[in-house]
Amino acid sequence: MNVLKNIFENFPENIKEEFFEDIISTKDFKLERIVSEGHSSPDGFWYDQKKNEFVLLLSGSAKISFDSGEKFELKPGDYLIINAHQKHRVDQTDKLEKTFWITLHY
């Protein structure tokens, strides 16, 4: 059965924590939607993922840093490819509008 959905709709109205939703998930990859609103990674926390990650920012803005010292400011349309076990964190997401992300873990 075909299902029509919209990436910018159907998420909690007040998101106290980032909202994560699996769109497609298999043993080999996961496509997910993330909605942020002024969120950031907890102090001292670094993502250290087992798979490579493709990150696409659809709306809003975000700042991401890596334990190597690299920092990126993302705007709509920007994407990053993050290698497995490359430690990274979200320093900040837009406080004035919701930030929508698509991530692919592969």
Image (cartoon, rainbow, N blue to C red):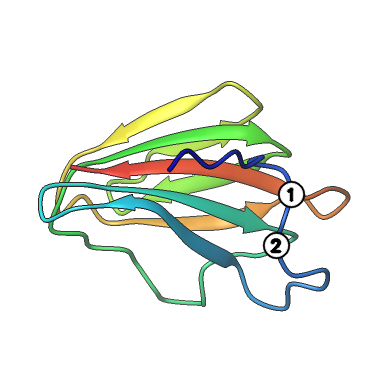
Q: CA distance from mark 2 to mark 1?
A: 6 Å
Q: Which mark identifies residue 9? A: 1
SS at badge 2: loop
Crowdedness near tag 1: few (<14), some (14–19) or many (≥20) residues, C-alpha within 10 Å:
few
Identify the residue position indicated by label 2 in the image: 11
Image coordinates of residue 33 in percent, x first then y, are: 51, 50
Q: Is residue 5 above or below residue 13?
A: above
What residue appears at the point 38 percent right and 39 percent down from the top-left corner?
Answer: 70
Looking at the rendered image, the quarter that the C terminus falls into is top left
Q: Is residue 26 above or below residue 59?
A: below
SS at badge 1: loop
Crowdedness near tag 2: few (<14), some (14–19) or many (≥20) residues, C-alpha within 10 Å:
few
Q: Residue 50 appears in which quarter of the rendering?
A: bottom left
> Outermost residue toward the top?
77
Closer to us: 42 or 56 = 56
106 vs 46, left or right, is left
Image coordinates of residue 66 in percent, x first then y, are: 35, 49
Q: Which mark identifies residue 98? A: none
Closer to us: 35 or 31 = 31
Q: Are marks 2 and 1 in contact (CB under 8 Å)?
A: yes
Q: How many marks?
A: 2
What residue appears at the point 74 percent right and 49 percent down from the top-left corner?
Answer: 9
Q: Is residue 100 above or below residue 90?
A: above
Looking at the rendered image, the quarter that the N terminus falls into is top left
Q: Amino acid at mark 2?
A: Phe
Closer to us: 75 or 58 = 58
Q: Amino acid at mark 1?
A: Glu
